[in-house]
Image: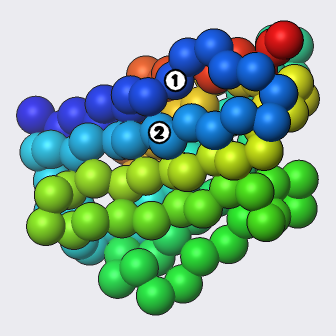
Amino acid sequence: QVQLVESGGGLVQPGGSLRLSCAASGFTFSRYAMTWYRQAPGQERELVAAIQNTGDSTNYADSVKGRFTISRDNAKNTVYLQMNSLKPEDTAVYYCNAHRKTFRIDYWGKGTLVTVSP
């Protein structure tokens, strides 16, 4: 059974930090690119950060460059999102996605809520 379970969300003040985790199971994690998306109320889901299966390549939305860092530990089947200098506009539900391009497979987690507020 495929599972992606996000954790680490919560309430934080502007300028603060959070570290999100996404624990994967039920598939060969090291063969999948991993991506963090987010969706704010009333807005479409957007890509935040992505990392290739080997961890060699990453990319970020312009809005988070220099503040967020995506990483993965293939031995632990986990992907992380370190979020620093958080802003109120970072408030959203953050989702973890696993993607295998060759077979056009996508798996999604249920999300974790991040709220940035004084």
Residue 48: image location, x then y, percent: 70, 51
Counting residues from the N terminus, which is met first, the one under dot 1 or under dot 2? 1
Please state, as top left, top right, bottom left or bottom right, where the C terminus lies in the image. top right
In three-dimensional space, the C-alpha distance between marks 1 and 2, rounded to whole angstroms, equals 6 Å
Q: Amino acid at mark 1?
A: Gly
Nearer to me, 72 or 12: 12
Task: Specify the quadrant of the image occupied by residue 85.
Answer: top right
Please state, as top left, top right, bottom left or bottom right, where the N terminus lies in the image. top left
Compared with 74, 57 (above or below) is: below
Compared with 78, 39 (above or below) is: above
Residue 33: image location, x then y, percent: 42, 67
SS at circle 2: strand
Task: Specify the quadrant of the image occupied by residue 64.
Answer: bottom right
Nearer to me, 90 or 42: 90
Res 100 visible: no
Task: Specify the quadrant of the image occupied by residue 41.
Answer: top right
Horizontal side, residue 117 vs residue 21: left or right? right
Horizontal side, residue 24 vs residue 20: left or right? left
Label 1 environment density (alpha carbons within 10 Å; few <14, some 14–19, many ≥20) = some
The residue pinned by badge 1 equals: 9
The way the protein has been coloured in the rendering is rainbow
Q: Are marks 1 and 2 in contact (CB under 8 Å)?
A: yes
The residue located at (43%, 22%) in the rendering is: 110
Residue 51: image location, x then y, percent: 51, 70
Label 2 environment density (alpha carbons within 10 Å; few <14, some 14–19, many ≥20) = many
Residue 78: image location, x then y, percent: 28, 53
Horizontal side, residue 88 vs residue 47: left or right? right
Res 4 visible: yes
The residue located at (80%, 36%) in the rendering is: 15
> Residue 20: which numbered mark, if any?
2
